[in-house]
Amino acid sequence: MIPPFAPEVLWLWGGLAGYLLSAVTALRIRSGAAPRQAERRVLAALWLAVVLLAVAVAQRWLRVGYGPFLTLFEILLSNVFSLGLFYAVAYWRVPAVRPGAVVVLPVLIVLGAWNVTVSPVQSDLPSTFDNPWLWVHVGTGKVFLGACLTAAGLAVVLLMHGAAGSETSRRSDLVAWRFMALAFVFQTLLIVAGAAWARDAWGRFWGWDPLETWSFITWLMAAAALHARVTWKLPPAMGWWSILAVLVLAILTFLGVPFLSHAAHKGIL
Amino acid sequence: MRVLRFLGSLKLTFALLVVVTGGIVAGYVGGLDARPLLTGALALLVLNLLGAITTHPRFRRQSALLAFHLCLLAAMLLVAAGDLLRLEGRLELANGQAFAPELVQITHRGVWHPEAALEAVAFRQGRFTVDYAPGLVRRTMRSWVDLGPDGVQPSRAVGGSTQPLVQEGFRFYATSNKGLAALVTWVADRGEAETGTVHFPSWPLNDWNQVNAWTSPDGDALVLELTPDLHVSAGEAFTFDSDRVPAVAELRVRHAQVTAVMLPGQSLRLPGGRLLFHGLTTWMGYRVTYDPTLPWLLATGIVGALALGGHFLGSLAPVPRSLRVANRDPALRA
């Protein structure tokens, strides 16, 4: 079924095209078909996509009168934008994450492709969303997912490469765990801010609802992964698998639960 | 010392994290009562942390990491203390009615909750307004309470609600549960008169079913049905304003097999006395919570997260120059 037209969908298509261009260039570099200097083109296409998606988010926001917090379309759109923005900054400032582009960009494309198939219907912003803690909660969540995706991108490339022990792998492994640590800090803040919001919105700071429960499980898994790396000096491949597992759990939690329920904190997972 | 070393082992930390995760999943997905398992695992995690602090000098030297873990410890203790001190309940107040502790229907009372604390709370229900978007979608809700002879403090409440009235550590959140009430006086045959309100189901959600059972002070079982002069079109935006509810309404009173219809100012003779119907008024429902540990818990969470950030910043930064240079391994190029 073709979803009803909404003007922001055009900008979304533009952003998707930018990600596609960026991903194709990254894959050409990886396969040796393009020189390393083409990384500039990867970054340029990535920024272009982010700008187009920012326009999509802004247009949607102005049109419906509330932020992208509610419907499947809005949550996907905001994540396709914010994950791209985080990765663009990381790609620009930390060149060591660039190998992960061949994983991260296709993930963004899949999310974007999913986004354009979803009906852009609007909803009514519940009055419980009128709270400053919501912004902290959502903002820290975006950084958490962005850092987690960046770490997982490197982890997957390292797993595919299978060259644990080389100097390059060691450096990439270190960078991947740095992003994992960053993700863990922001995930902690995400949960704290969510609890503060929940107290004002629903009169309790923790209610073991689906999103809260799975968010806590994700936090525990990330904590376990970080402890395991410190404790047992995990074989690198096992560590990369654990990073990937945390990302999968995070996606199921933060994208799966709201998508299945069509409303935050009412998921069926 | 061996016991302490075992208790402080990082391997034990990892195992306990896995147990906690497994317990939550078992409780959530499998529907098992995982509380004993989780309580035990969390208690062991506390001992594990204390053991680690005691037996690992390196851990003690990493002050930011230590601060994060101490915050985790404090958070667990605060959650436990909060559960023991907490009070939760529900409250309905008619327009103009003064708060009284016995009106609170308590749903949870921690064993350490101070019994007399609610007696220090004093306010009187005032006006409330609830804005509805088309489709009966509830938007902004405001409830004002009178805090004293002269002071009127607006207790703005939104939705579930996001801005409670706070008194003596108790938080009163206005809820979506609010509606219409009949203001009545019961005059017993013995001569005593009592005035009060009969609350009907939440309005406008239950506008089709404004019926409630009521037993008079003399034991007459009645069924009251209210027909207010209020009409809501679900397709239009409107505001439910307690000050604009028309006082005129029709009250049907069923007693035994007899039904009588009353208008404001009329009375009805019943076996134990006389029922006077004064007119229509409103009531507001509140959720009441008390947990003095919450501000500390929030502060602990924020300090802990910042300490963790500080630890990673300190231990991992500065990023070696080699990491800032693009990867030159052909297999990892992109």
Image (cartoon, rainbow, N blue to C red):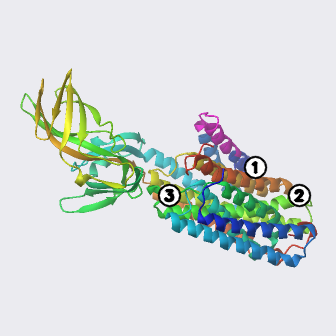
Name the kind of residue labelled 3 in the image. Answer: Ala
Q: CA distance from mark 2 to mark 3?
A: 41 Å
Residue carrying label 2? A160
Query: What residue is drawn where x is 81% and y is 70%?
Result: A98
Q: Secondary structure at mark 3?
A: helix
Q: Nearer the viewer, mark 2 or mark 3?
A: 2
For marks 1 and 3, give the CA distance: 32 Å
How many C-alpha atoms fall within 10 Å of the one at disc 1: few (<14), some, or many (≥20)?
Answer: some
Tell me the mark number nearer the camera, choosing from 1 and 3: 3
Residue count near mark 2 (Cα–Cα under 10 Å), binned few <14, some 14–19, many ≥20 = few
Magenta span dominant secondary structure: helix
Sequence-earlier tag: 2 or 3: 2
Position above or below: A269 against B122: above
The answer to whether residue B57 is visible is no
Residue A163 shown in magenta: no
Q: Nearer the viewer, mark 2 or mark 1?
A: 2
Q: Residue A187: image x %, image y %?
A: 63, 59
Q: Which quarter of the figure has residue A231?
A: bottom right
Q: Chain of mark 1?
A: B
Subunit of label 3: A
Residue position marked by numbered label 3 in the rendering: A196
Say what amino acid the circle numbered 1 marks: Lys
Numbered badge on residue B11: 1
Q: Nearer the viewer, residue A179 or A98?
A: A98
Residue B317, horizontal then vertical, whole percent: 73, 73
Q: Looking at the image, can residue A263 be seen? A: yes
Depth check, front residue: A220 or B114: A220
Tell me the magenta residue range: B18-37
Quick one: B206 or B10, which is closer to the camera?
B206
* In the image, farthest residue toward the top: B257
